[in-house]
């Protein structure tokens, strides 16, 4: 609840909207306010008014404050466009997004209910395009124009949700000229966010926490990416993403590695030749990007295949330095960890556990690995501790979301503990595949054996004389090890591993291969396969939820276990050789029962694969009997393709490869066997 004083001073007109629909506009210097309000909304555009409406529906008493008249800003001139779409004699409306818009550093303070004078030279590109589509436009004149400011974000999506630092401060802004479309639904979810702690639907793509604190001060990056999101508004967005390098939460990471002795250098942003910038003549990187511009298989298919199969049959090296790394320490660290995480966390120092962290509704907020720490020697990988401590690693794109979630729970429960992020101080190299143990042993004197390094164990070892934390775990379904390295020693350790790797035919592999490998094994990806509207039972992860003790969301998990899940995640393979990506419709017999969250190609299975949740068409609980009796198809571009459903991935169902047992390279699983 925000406490508000009895009145405040204003030098200009102020509009107020109170709960109950009362509207007041004051032309005096003093405007009366209620003594207190449940929520104060600043800004009376369509987003602010929609939020006011949705909160009032839920019994909240909000106050909306607007500097001038309601809906006088972007909503006003956008509303004018909607009005103009009505039949108006022989007039017609058109517009677009040019490559050289005027970029405003700030809007004048007195700018309200106003428009800018249109620069006809900038708008000329739209006139020419209109004539190409409809030659009659060449004979038409301009009756009126509307030119006002719009706010854009780096990824063309609004900024919504609670501030990651200031508890109780929420955002609903940056709508990229789509506020009239989005504000109704977004405001409904925002009202749940405010009243219940979290929205009912997955809102990660709009969540302000998708950007980290280190990205926000980078003015050049913000300006360049916002310009590109504007200029490419109507460009076709292909499902396949990534090229030579890709980005995750502001970190650059390898997507795949070019072969055939060619390079593709990344040049600075050339603004597509606008604002007196010269277009780059070196287009090698652009040509690499264009190989993914298809709804079929990428032209990089064979490159990614070679990296994936090399990892399955030999050994691959992945750079996971973009992952978010944190320490949980303090007097209440153990108690806090019990509340935050669903899995048992071993008391034995060095043990690594995969676990979930839920919200109060039992929805999945994050999945991480947690290592129980012993008192170290004062290094980054072995810090000095007073009592229990934990080393937490979260995926790259979701890392800031995870950090914010954990910190908020510590605050709400008043635990005497803290989360300290060290992402930019540690790098991670991941050695995966049948020869990973031999390669790691060749660069360290520490014993890398099953006795010393069983699955899920970590130790401090030295590589090239540098202390690192080695963990035996895998995100690709192979025997493998992650090496966590102080930043200052990353290059030295990398060179040591790569040089030794020449004797093992080591392959450098990127995230495109890793995404395929992890999905082929049936592992989940946060904010795609696992979202806040999914619970562990639905996601097939109830084995990572302990029976003893309490953790946030446990009562909901136990309830779903007893009553049955309304949806279940399933693994699909296609019989036809067709590219498969996410958001494809799942058919069971003649009924739609869900959609794929994600799709890829499984190179060891040699088929297109997908992960998606299946629901009962009549809203009943979903069980194995229901799943095994149907005939399934996946709809891809208006055509249905036969699909085989598995309750779990058929790749290495007994986890023999994780244990380093490669006698049986592949074992087929009955697709009805749980």
Image (cartoon, helix red, strand yellow):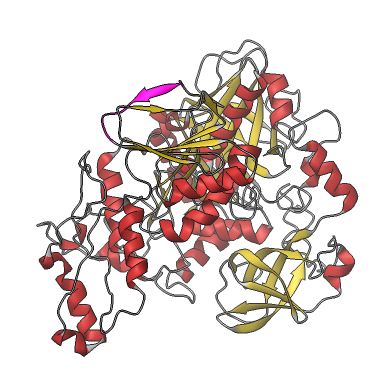
Q: Quadrant of residue 445?
A: top right
Name the residue nearer the viewer: 604 or 504. Answer: 604
In the image, what residue occupies the spot 32% across and 41% down? 68
In the rendered view, does 541 fall on the left or right side of 432?
A: right
Name the residue nearer the viewer: 514 or 26. Answer: 26
Q: Position of residue 621 (x, y in %)?
A: 85, 60
In the rendered view, does 90 fall on the left or right side of 531?
A: left
Let me know if residue 438 appears in the view.
no
Q: Position of residue 297 (x, y in %)?
A: 49, 74
Name the residue nearer the viewer: 55 or 247. Answer: 55
In the image, what residue occupies the spot 14% across and 79% down? 141
In the image, what residue occupies the spot 48% across and 31% down? 485
Name the residue nearer the viewer: 45 or 545. Answer: 45
Q: With respect to residue 294, does 36 lie above or below? A: above
Question: Looking at this rendering, what residue extends furthest in the bottom direction?
Answer: 136
Q: Which residues are magenta?
A: 5-12
Does 597 lie within the magenta span?
no
Q: Position of residue 512 (x, y in %)?
A: 49, 59
In the image, what residue occupies the spot 14% across and 58% down? 117
Picture quarter with the N terminus: top right
Query: What secondary structure do most residues of the magenta stretch adopt?
Result: loop
């Amino acid at each position: 609840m925000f406490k508000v004083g009895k009145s405040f001073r204003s030098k200009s007109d102020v509009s107020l909207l109170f709960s109950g629909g009362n509207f007041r506009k004051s032309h005096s210097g003093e405007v009366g306010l209620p003594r207190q309000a449940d929520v104060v909304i600043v800004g009376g555009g369509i987003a602010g008014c929609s939020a006011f409406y949705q909160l009032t529906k839920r019994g909240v008493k909000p106050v909306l404050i607007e500097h001038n008249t309601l809906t006088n800003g972007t909503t006003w001139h956008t509303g004018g466009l909607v009005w103009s779409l009505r039949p108006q004699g022989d007039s017609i409306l058109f517009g677009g997004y040019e490559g050289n818009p005027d970029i405003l550093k700030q809007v004048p303070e007195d700018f309200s209910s106003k428009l800018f004078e249109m620069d006809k030279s900038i708008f000329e590109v739209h006139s020419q395009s209109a004539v190409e589509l409809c030659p009659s436009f060449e004979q038409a004149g301009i009756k009126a124009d509307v030119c006002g400011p719009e706010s854009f974000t780096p990824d063309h999506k609004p900024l919504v949700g609670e501030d990651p630092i200031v508890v109780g401060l929420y955002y609903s802004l940056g709508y990229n000229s789509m506020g009239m479309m989005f504000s109704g639904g977004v405001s409904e979810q925002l009202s749940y966010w405010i009243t219940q702690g979290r929205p009912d639907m997955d809102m990660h793509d709009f969540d302000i926490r998708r950007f980290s604190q280190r990205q926000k001060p980078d003015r050049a990056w913000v300006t360049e990416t916002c310009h590109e999101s504007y200029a490419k508004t109507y460009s076709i967005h292909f499902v396949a993403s990534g090229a030579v390098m890709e980005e995750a939460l502001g970190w650059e990471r390898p997507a795949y590695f070019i072969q055939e002795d060619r390079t593709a250098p990344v040049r600075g942003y050339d603004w597509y030749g606008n604002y007196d910038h010269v277009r780059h003549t070196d287009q090698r990187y652009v040509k690499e990007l264009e190989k993914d511009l298809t709804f079929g298989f990428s032209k990089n298919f064979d490159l990614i295949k070679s990296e994936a199969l090399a990892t399955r049959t030999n050994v691959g090296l992945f750079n996971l330095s973009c992952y978010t790394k944190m320490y949980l320490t303090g007097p209440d660290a153990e108690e806090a960890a019990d509340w935050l995480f669903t899995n048992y966390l071993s008391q034995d120092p060095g043990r690594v556990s995969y676990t979930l962290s839920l919200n109060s509704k039992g929805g999945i907020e994050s999945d991480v690995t947690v290592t129980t720490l012993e008192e170290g020697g004062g290094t980054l990988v072995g810090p000095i501790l007073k009592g229990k401590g934990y080393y937490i690693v979260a995926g790259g794109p979701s890392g800031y979301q995870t950090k914010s979630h954990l910190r908020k729970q510590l605050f709400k429960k008043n635990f005497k503990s803290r989360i300290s992020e060290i992402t930019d101080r540690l790098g991670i190299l991941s050695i995966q595949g049948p020869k990973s143990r031999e390669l790691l042993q060749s660069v360290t004197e520490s014993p890398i054996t099953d006795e010393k390094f069983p699955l899920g164990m970590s130790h401090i070892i030295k590589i090239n004389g540098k202390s690192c934390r080695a963990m035996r775990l895998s995100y690709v379904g192979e025997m493998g090890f992650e090496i966590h390295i102080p930043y200052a020693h990353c290059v030295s350790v990398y060179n040591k591993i790569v040089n030794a790797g020449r004797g093992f035919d080591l392959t450098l592999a990127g995230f495109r291969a890793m995404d395929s490998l992890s999905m082929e094994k049936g592992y989940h990806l946060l904010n795609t396969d696992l979202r806040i509207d999914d619970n562990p039972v639905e996601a097939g992860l109830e084995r990572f939820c302990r029976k003893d003790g309490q953790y946030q969301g446990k009562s909901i998990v136990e309830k779903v276990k007893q009553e049955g899940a309304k949806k279940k995640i399933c693994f699909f393979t296609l019989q036809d050789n067709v590219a498969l990506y996410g958001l494809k419709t799942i058919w069971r017999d003649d009924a739609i029962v869900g959609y794929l969250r994600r799709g890829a190609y499984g190179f060891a299975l040699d088929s297109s694969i997908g992960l998606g949740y299946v629901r009962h068409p009549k809203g009943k609980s979903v069980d194995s009997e229901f799943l095994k009796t149907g005939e399934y198809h996946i709809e891809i571009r208006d055509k249905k393709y036969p699909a085989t459903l598995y309750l779990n991935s058929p790749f290495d169902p007994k986890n023999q490869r994780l244990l380093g047992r490669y006698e049986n390279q592949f074992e087929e699983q009955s697709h009805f066997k749980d």
